[in-house]
Amino acid sequence: MDRAAHLLGTVFGFDEFRPGQAEIVEAVAAGRNVLAIMPTGGGKSLCFQLPALCREGVTVVISPLIALMRDQVRALREVGIEAGALTSGNTAEETDAVFRALDEGRLKLLYMAPERLASGGTLPLLRRIGTSLIAVDEAHCVSQWGHDFRPDYLAIGQLRRTLDVPLAAFTATADEETRTEIVARLFDGAPPETFLRGFDRPNIHLAFAAKNGPRKQIVDFADARRGQSGIVYCGTRARTETLSAALGREGHTACHYHGGMDPDARRAVETRFQQEDGLIVVATVAFGMGVDKPDIRWVAHADLPKSIEAYYQEIGRAGRDGAPAETLTLYGADDIRLRRTQIDESLAPPERKDADHARLNALLGLAEAMRCRRRTLLGYFGETAEACGNCDLCDTPPEVFDATEPVRKALSAMLRTSESFGAGHLIDILTGTETDKVRARGHEGLPTFGVGRDLTRAAWQAVFRQMMGRDLVRPDAARHGAFRMTQAARPILRGEETIELRRDTIKAAATRPAIKTLVSEEDAPLLSALKAKRRALAEAARMPAYMVFNDRTLIEMAETRPGTLDAMARISGVGAKKLERYGADFLSVIAGADAGPGTGPVHPARRRLAGQEAGDVFDRLVEAQTELARGAAGTDKPMRCSPAALARVAALRRADPAALEGILGARHAERFGPAFLSILQET
């Protein structure tokens, strides 16, 4: 592990592993079979890229999409690692270069798609080059009933047996059933060393909303986040085009993406999204699996996803850099009806249909949740959590009411009409609306006619939607979508159980403020200048901007303002190769931002205290922070306070522990509080 830790810093530019990475890297580097389930943005790629540098021979990476492979290969080359990909998208020159590097023994990582395993020349090639490890990215694609099934993934298990080498499988999306299938198909049922590193993405704000003019809801959501990169997922190809046009009319830079487009047009969209800041892509789920863009700030669903796994993977494309990101998922009765019908009309066996209905129920339970969404989401994956404070239900707890009586009335109306009608006709009966259809069937004479006049039509629509969401009723595809009652509803109808529902309050999607700024107001101009420099360098090299430095690295530069290459090297994400290539360019931007008569690279927060006693206090606080950055023992996770926070502490007129905690927050106050209070008391 000493070699791995050294390479982590010198090659990748990171001072320490992310939570859970070190144990996985150690297991993979040691040649043990591994299954790792890690959240998107948790650093899965590093867990096979770093061991590849520590091991002899070539690591073969099986990856599902060409765009994903090309991005990872280019990123590896940027940090000085020899890597290549054999894909159908290669030019002849690119393929020749890969084979030449393999023949010369220079290549450490070889990427290929699972479809290439069927080629007769692949196995002899992998033997000849000294394959020592197989890494499988997006391993859930091996699950035949998963949402991203790839038949060619089924050949990977045989490849492992034939080459007799260890295999490391990685995914962010695998419930217990999928994990069992991965073990059976890739490891012949022999349990690998399994790492389940949690599914929580605490930086992502979760939100759902009932549809109420979905086009306007999406446009309003984008308006509140203008200028930020985002993805909008739609259920149909046609909707991607109309919604993209609507966003364009409102002044957003937006384009659409779906499987029916010309391949060159799709590639053009992928390239634009990676290289342009602030572009919105409106897409079907065909887009995104190969997106390695770390600074997507928001993801919206204009239609309900297929399952909770699909939802988790799609929102996981936001905030991969760890900075704040937001999501919005719209849903309505038509979405639920469509998903139920798709399951019922599929050719799957009955037991699979039951499992698919159960998975849909989990997603609908998340949509109609009455408590913290993150607790509900993580609970599905077998994890427990406290209320997160970063979802719409924590922001504004929903209003609930005892809906037992309305639900019983609705069920009674269904039974008295032989379960032959959908919500529209049933609501006419409940509200006492004499339509031609009601009179033609004599339903105005039913005992349930008019018993629901106390609720509005919109309220009844919400009741029926939530009844579908709670799987009390299902649309029957064989009877044109007529509702039929499930077994779960019978105890309520008989008065044996009660039920609470949410009282719908339709709110505009943009009522929540836009994402908080990534840096303080003082540092924002420098961050913009650093991004401009990054964009210029990326455009000159014709590569995505994040491959120069990601947003988190630029944020740290803007806040700490390194003045030398030595100081720049301590910035997270600045490895030796990138320091050599880009260090001087970014130092010049920082020096230019700080230049002035008699000034060096001093933070504006400190500059404003010049000539004041608080300035000396500020400097002493910085010294104390440096000494305690890794805790008193020097072994804790690095932590620091922003210069703006230190300036506020320095300006305190007395050593007030409560005021200090109010400025720094509890975690920072716990580490730095005693030392800071001592300095304040002395002055």
Image: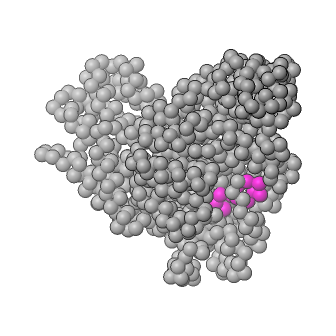
Q: Point out the image quarter for the C terminus.
A: top left
Q: Quadrant of residue 565?
A: bottom left
Taking the view exactly as shown, the residue that stands out farthest to the left is 597
Q: Quadrant of residue 157?
A: bottom right
Query: Does residue 571 appear left or right of residue 349 in this picture?
Result: left
Whether residue 418 is visible here, answered yes or no, is: yes
Query: Does residue 560 appear left or right of residue 612 in this picture?
Result: right
Query: Does residue 175 appear left or right of residue 668 in this picture?
Result: right
Q: Point out the image quarter for the N terminus.
A: bottom right
Query: Does residue 618 appear left or right of residue 278 in this picture?
Result: left
Residue at image position (72%, 38%) is: 362
**Spot occupied by residue 307 in the image (x, y as percentages of width and height):** 69, 45
Viewer-closest of 429 and 311: 429
Viewer-closest of 124 and 439: 439
Residue at image position (53%, 43%) is: 215
**Spot occupied by residue 439 in the image (x, y as percentages of width and height):** 79, 28
Give the residues drawn in magenta, as a range. Answer: 136-146
Whether residue 389 is visible here, answered yes or no, is: no
Residue 261 vertical position relative to residue 423 in the rendered view, above or below: below
Residue at image position (53%, 55%) is: 241
**Spot occupied by residue 314 in the image (x, y as percentages of width and height):** 60, 49
Residue 651 vertical position relative to residue 94 in the rendered view, above or below: above
**Spot occupied by residue 243 in the image (x, y as percentages of width and height):** 52, 49
Viewer-closest of 18 and 138: 138
How many marks are shown on the rendered structure? 0
Viewer-closest of 225 and 574: 225
Residue at image position (39%, 48%) is: 251
Residue 371 lies within the magenta run? no
